[in-house]
C-alpha cells in the first residue's frame, strides 16, 4: 500500500529527517541518549563566574564549548550551530550549505550583560559618577560597533542562516519557556500552508549568567538545594523547590512527507499536532483552573487527529517548581481522565536542567529518540512522592516501552503554552 503524503485533514504530513542536540550531558544524540537513559545528571556547581552571596550556585551549564566573549548571544549561537550541524548532516541534503527552506530560531531575550556594561561605563567615565549622557557618548564611539551587532536580537538567526544557507529572512522568536516548541510549530505551519517543503527549526539558550540567576531568584523560581548539585532538580516530587537553569540547543529538520520520500530521505518521525493557548492570568502564575494548559494539550491532540487514549507517553515540561508541576499534572489528568494514572510521564529537566528557550526543541528531540529507542528516560531525584500528583513519573530509572505517540509539553512564564504531538507514524 502506498504511504500517504497528507494527513486526515488533507494537509501535507510533516516529517523529521534530521535532529541535533547539545546539553550539559554532551554533544549529539548518542551522548545525550546514553546519559538520559542512564539517569545521569549534567547539573553541577557553576565555575564560570563567582557565585558568592548567590542563593543558587548550580546549573546545567555547557562548559565544554568555550566562546569569546562568553555571553548569552555568543554561546546561544554556538550551541545552535552545533545542533544544526548534526541535524542538517543527518538530513543529507544534496548541496551542502544550501538548505532548501526557511529558518526558525528560538533565542533568549538579548540585552547588554554586566561585563559589557562595566566596560562601557569605564570608557565613558572621566571623573566621578557616570551620567546617562556620558554612557550614550561612549556607546556612540566605533569601539563598540561589534557589541551593537552582538546584542541585537536577530543576530544569532542571521549568522546561522548564513552558515547553513537557509531561504528567506530568518525568523527569531522568544516566547519564554515555550520558545523551542513554538519554533517547531512555525516550521510545521509553513510546510502545511505550502510555503516551504522543508524548514530548519532550532531552540538554543546559553544564558546562565549572574544577572539571570538573580532575576529568577527574585521570582523564587530557582532551587536553592545546592548540595549535591545533581540532586537539586526534583520534578513532581513533594520536596521540589524550584527549577535549575540549564543550557543547550536542539535542531530539527522538518520536511513534507512528499519531499522526503521523493529524495529518498530517512524519516525519523512525524510532527503530527501542535497546540497553543495564551494565559493572561498572571505574569508568572498559571490560571488556577488550568484552562489554558488544558486547551493547549487538547488542541495538540486534536490537531494530530488523535484522541487522548492514543497518547503512549508524556514528555513533561516538568520544571520542578511547586506550582508548575501541579498545574501540568492537573492539565494532563483533565484531558486524559483516569487513564492518566497509568500513562508514563517524565521530565528530562531533572537531568539537564531547564534550558529555557531551548527546552521545547530539546524535549522534542528526546521524544523522538524515545520513540525510536523504545525506552523512557526517567525522572531522577524522585524520592518523596507528592500525593497531589498521583502519576507514573518513571521514577529514577529508565524503562523499556513501546511508544507510538508522544505528547511534549512546554509551558512558559507569561502564559505561553505550546504542546506538540510527535509520532512514529500517522494513525
Image (cartoon, rainbow, N blue to C red):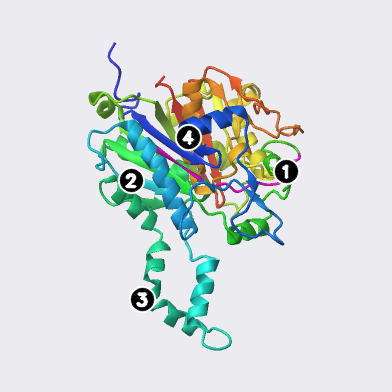
| Residue 224, percent from left and from top | 72, 50
Q: Earlier in the sequence, mark 3 or mark 1?
A: 3
Secondary structure at numbered mark 2: strand
Residue 189, placed above or below residue 122: above
Q: Secondary structure at mark 3?
A: helix
**Is disc 1 placed on a helix, strand or loop?**
loop
For the residues bearing labels 2 and 3, Cβ distance under 8 angstroms: no
Query: Quadrant of the rendered structure where residue 187 is?
Result: top left
Image quadrant assignment for residue 273? top left
Q: Is residue 72 magenta?
A: no
Q: CA distance from mark 1 to mark 2?
A: 39 Å
The mark lying in front, picked from 1 and 2, is 1
Name the disc covering residue 228, or none.
Answer: 1
Q: Which residue is depicted at the point 36% across and 46% down? A: 104
Residue 107 locus on image (x, y percent): 45, 51
Instruction: Please tell me which of labels 4 and 2 falls first in the chain.
Output: 2
Across and down, in percent, residue 400 comes to: 58, 18
Mark 4 vs 2: CB contact within 8 A: no
Horizontal side of residue 265 vs 393, given as left or right: left
> Is residue 161 at least partly visible in the picture?
yes
Eye-nearest disc, 3 or 4: 3
Query: What range of the chain is rendered magenta?
Result: 239-252
Residue 364's tag is: 4
Q: CA distance from mark 2 to mark 3?
A: 31 Å
Identify the mark at residue 142; answer none if there is no mark.
3
Nearest-to-viewer mark from 4 and 1: 1
For this view, does 50 lie left or right of residue 75?
A: right
Amino acid at each position: 500500500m502506498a504511504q500517504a503524503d497528507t494527513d486526515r485533514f488533507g494537509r501535507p504530513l510533516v516529517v523529521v529527517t534530521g535532529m541535533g542536540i547539545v546539553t550539559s550531558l554532551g554533544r549529539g544524540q548518542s551522548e545525550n541518549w546514553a546519559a538520559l537513559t542512564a539517569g545521569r545528571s549534567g547539573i553541577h556547581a557553576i565555575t564560570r563566574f563567582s557565585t558568592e552571596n548567590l542563593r543558587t550556585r548550580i546549573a546545567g551549564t555547557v562548559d565544554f564549548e568555550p566562546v569569546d566573549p562568553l555571553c548569552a548571544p555568543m554561546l546561544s549561537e554556538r550551541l545552535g550551530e552545533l545542533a544544526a550541524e548534526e541535524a542538517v548532516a543527518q538530513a543529507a541534503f544534496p548541496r551542502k550549505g544550501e538548505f532548501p527552506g526557511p529558518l526558525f530560531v528560538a533565542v533568549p531575550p538579548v540585552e547588554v550583560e554586566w561585563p559589557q556594561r562595566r566596560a562601557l561605563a569605564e570608557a565613558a567615565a572621566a571623573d566621578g559618577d557616570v551620567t546617562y549622557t556620558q554612557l550614550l557618548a561612549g556607546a556612540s564611539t566605533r569601539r563598540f560597533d561589534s557589541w551593537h551587532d552582538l546584542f541585537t536580537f536577530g543576530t544569532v538567526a542571521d549568522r546561522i542562516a548564513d552558515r547553513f544557507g537557509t531561504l528567506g529572512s530568518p525568523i527569531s522568536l522568544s516566547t519564554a519557556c515555550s520558545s523551542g516548541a513554538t519554533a517547531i510549530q512555525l516550521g510545521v505551519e509553513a510546510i502545511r500552508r505550502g510555503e516551504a517543503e522543508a524548514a530548519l527549526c532550532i531552540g538554543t539558550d546559553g544564558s546562565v549568567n549572574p544577572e539571570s540567576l538573580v532575576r529568577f531568584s527574585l521570582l523564587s523560581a530557582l532551587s536553592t538545594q545546592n548540595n549535591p548539585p545533581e540532586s537539586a532538580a526534583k520534578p513532581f516530587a513533594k520536596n521540589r523547590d524550584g527549577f535549575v537553569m540549564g543550557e543547550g540547543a536542539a535542531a530539527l529538520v522538518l520536511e513534507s512527507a512528499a519531499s522526503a520520500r521523493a529524495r529518498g530521505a530517512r524519516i525519523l518521525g512525524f510532527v503530527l499536532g501542535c497546540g497553543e493557548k495564551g494565559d493572561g492570568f498572571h505574569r508568572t502564575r498559571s490560571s488556577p483552573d488550568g484552562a489554558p494548559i488544558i486547551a493547549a494539550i487538547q488542541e495538540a491532540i486534536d490537531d494530530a487527529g488523535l484522541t487522548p487514549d492514543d497518547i503512549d507517553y508524556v514528555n513533561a515540561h516538568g520544571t520542578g517548581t511547586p506550582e508548575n508541576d501541579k498545574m501540568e499534572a492537573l492539565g494532563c489528568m483533565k484531558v486524559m481522565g483516569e487513564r492518566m494514572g497509568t500513562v508514563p510521564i517524565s521530565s528530562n529537566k531533572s537531568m539537564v536542567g531547564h534550558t529555557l528557550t531551548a527546552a521545547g526543541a530539546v524535549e522534542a528531540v528526546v521524544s523522538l529518540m524515545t520513540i525510536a529507542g523504545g525506552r523512557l528516560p526517567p525522572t531522577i531525584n524522585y524520592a518523596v512522592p507528592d500525593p497531589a500528583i498521583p502519576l507514573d513519573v518513571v521514577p529514577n530509572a529508565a524503562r523499556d516501552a513501546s511508544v507510538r505517540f508522544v505528547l511534549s509539553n512546554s509551558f512558559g512564564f507569561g502564559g505561553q503554552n505550546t504542546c506538540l504531538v510527535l509520532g512514529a507514524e500517522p494513525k
